[in-house]
Image (cartoon, grey):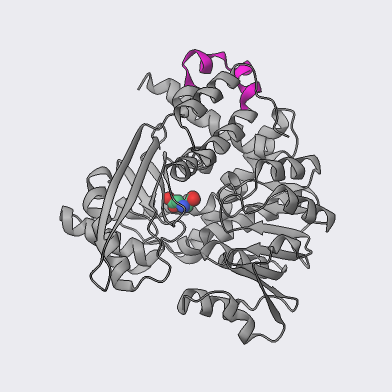
Amino acid sequence: MMAVLDEKLEPIYQDVLRRNPGETEFHQAVREVLESLGPVLVKHPEFAEHKIIQRICEPERQIIFRVPWEDDSGETHINRAFRVEFNSALGPYKGGMRFHSSVYLGIIKFLGFEQIFKNALTGMPIGGGKGGSDFDPKGRSEAEIMRFCQSLMIELYRHIGEYTDVPAGDIGVGQREIGYLFGQYKRITNRYESGVFTGKGVGWGGSRARTEATGYGTVFFLDEMLKVRGETLEGKTCIVSGSGNVAIFAIEKILELGGKVVACSDSNGVIVDEQGIDLAVLKEIKLVERRRISSYAQRRDSARYRENGVIWDVPCEVALPCATQNELTGRDARKLLANGCIAVAEGANMPTTPEGVRLFLDASIAYGPGKAANAGGVATSALEMQQNASRDSWTFEYTEQRLREIMVGIHRRCHDTAEEYAAPNNYVVGANITGFLKVAHAMVALGLV
Ligand code: GLU
């Protein structure tokens, strides 16, 4: 099922496997990029000469540390936290922190690796990094979450900074957690260094539209892919996996653009609402009450809850995976295609398995891979950094307009690069090559560092 790697790239990939044993998600992310790069090495022999691929696959720095904390009953817990500072050729390391029980080094490295190319694609001056912890926030009190964030920051503060490494949120880390992390950073360093974090609250240095940005951006990218095919979202039946910030604001933008969303999900099950998901109810449950999605069905007669259901079985024309890695398998891709799905845009990072990606590409549907389609989040983080640097604060409308322009630009560059490399409408090739070229040229220019 896997595509063959270029003969120059195969030994590099084998080396990545050998040097990073057991890190399957990282292997997957590397392989997916390398599969696109064969023709680039033919055009640019200087990259092989400078060992750019080998260097790009090796993080510049990896930090692993212990986070001890006490729960509300006084019991001690030990978690492990990570910050992988992957590549700083284009700017300070930039990427979120993920708190989830599944986190281990392989997950953070896959995310950090993807982030390098995604951030390059935005056209903003940001390098790639990622962090997180195997801390599970589910069922934890506010006080426990605050203590955990404070304990983590006692170590992390020395590694980050406006000009070195700028974390943000990801799964399990939203504005609340950023607040606790930033508060502790400020206390330790005695500096109100707004630019050290993004995803802050609007009242304390955050950017308007940052919360909405990843979801909105994914739909802007989707809209551009549809335009190329002479289509629009108007009247289209959509399904959106997940029910976090990315999913909720993707749904909001789909509705604004005239689409209909009939299903969403969380890690326990799926909600199907043939009348269309009621966004106000969903927001109340997820953003205000912080409850599981099953409560949605109790509040809407038209909704059904399927415990352990697979969202991709719900017939649709457009599918947005906005939950987590490898949530959409080959089997799911077949089901979507059989049901007439014409477009997939990834709000999550690497949500489709390699087999699923292959099926979408072979079927020539509009398929927008995460590192292009979900780049709106980190792009708006870079806009937040701009506002912080100039001590300015922009309106929602202006910020959203900038986001939209950035997504249109990413789409255009991916589209055009795919054509240039004889893979028309293949946004995987387009995104990988466009992002790689930007970073690779900078790395050559900066010398052997
Ligand atoms: N975690 C987000 C991503 O996957 C955002 C990162 C950021 O804003 O730095 O791109």
Residue 103, percent from left and from top:
44, 50
Which residue shows up at 29% across the image and 64% down it?
180
Which residue shows up at 46% across the image and 41% down it?
106
Left or right: 50, with 334 as reference point: left
Q: What's the magenta region? A: 37-52
Q: Main secondary structure of the magenta part?
A: helix
Image quarter hosting the N terminus: top right
In depth, the one of 61 and 2 nearer the eye is 2
Residue 258, percent from left and from top:
72, 69
Which residue shows up at 41% across the image and 63% down it?
174
Left or right: 324, with 82 as reference point: right
Task: Answer whether residue 336 is magenta in the image.
Answer: no
Picture quarter containing residue 443? top left
State the residue lying farthest toward the front. Answer: 75
Picture quarter containing residue 231? bottom right
Image quarter hosting the C terminus: top left
Residue 244, percent from left and from top:
52, 65
Is 444 above or below relative to 57?
Answer: above
Left or right: 174, with 438 as reference point: left
Task: Answer whether residue 46 is magenta in the image.
Answer: yes
Residue 193 is at least partly visible in this image: no
In depth, the one of 183 and 201 nearer the eye is 183
Is 122 above or below relative to 339?
Answer: above
